[in-house]
Image (spheres, rainbow, N blue to C red):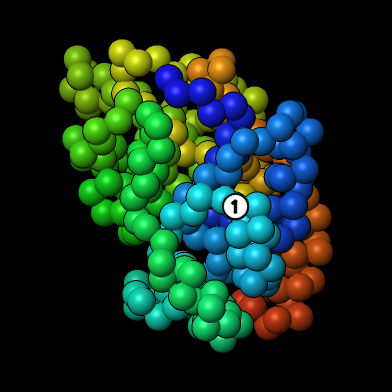
Amino acid sequence: MEEMGRVLILSDVHANLAALEAVLSHAEAGGPIEEIWCLGDMVGYGPQPRECLARLRELGAICLVGNHDLAAIGQISTQDFNPAAAAAARWTQSQLTSEEKEYLSSLEEVIVKGPFTMVHGTLRWPIWEYLYSHEAARAHLERQKTPFSLVGHTHIPMLVVEEPNLPEGCQLFYLPDGLNVTLESFRRLVINPGGVGQPRDGDPRASYAIYDSERGTVTVHRVEYDIARTQRLMAQAGLPRWLIERLSVGR
């Protein structure tokens, strides 16, 4: 595999600067970061969309577009969003500058980088589909041309292993903190690093992953951040109470 050093893999930052900064500090403490890959939804839900975009752009992150990014620039409808998410999308849209909206509109839905294909949702439905089920995983793998792929959107760290001999065609696993996934060229994998800014697996700590090309591994990490600070900023912005409260429980 191509030597890339240590690559920081992020998804679903959701305008949560405190979580993003905690992840950056934690990742950098483990050694130099050569690249940052962000799997979409930099904005939406949280109180600091402009600051998060500025930070990722400052760092030269390779970013994909997600459904909340498109909602924040009016390129998709919020009709299928729950009321709280739709309200947050409208608020986010009011905060972004024209230049920031142009940046989001320029982002790709799918990017191939070395042995990885990156997408926010799935390769069948890049913006909207959640990779929760065996059926969605099989459809994604049918379209995956590289050995490995990275997805976000669910906010849950997860591994899919292709298993052609099984009736389901694959196996799905939850990825706990610190588990090393070994990348083996003889079987295809799908990895979700979890959500930075709004975890949904019952663990409120920010979630991210590190790809170590020298070791041939991807490792999920969890890191605590100042949740109360983000919640105060959300309250000051008038964002929905449910979005504020869910950060405390990771749901």
Residue 244 position by quadrant: bottom right
Q: Name the residue under label 1.
A: 60
Residue 207 visible within the image: yes
* Residue 154 drawn above or below residue 165: below
Is residue 5 or residue 118 the one in the foreground? 5
Residue 43, horizontal then vertical, whole percent: 56, 66
Is residue 36 or residue 134 the one in the foreground? 36
Residue type marked 1: Gly
Horizontally, is 224 left or right of 80 in the view? Answer: right
The residue at 56%/15% (across/down) is 215
Residue 147 position by quadrant: top left
Horizontally, is 213 left or right of 54 in the view? Answer: left
Residue 46, horizontal then vertical, whole percent: 63, 68
* Residue 52 drawn above or below residue 147: below
Residue 135 position by quadrant: top left
Residue 224, horizontal then vertical, whole percent: 76, 44
The residue at 18%/22% (across/down) is 167
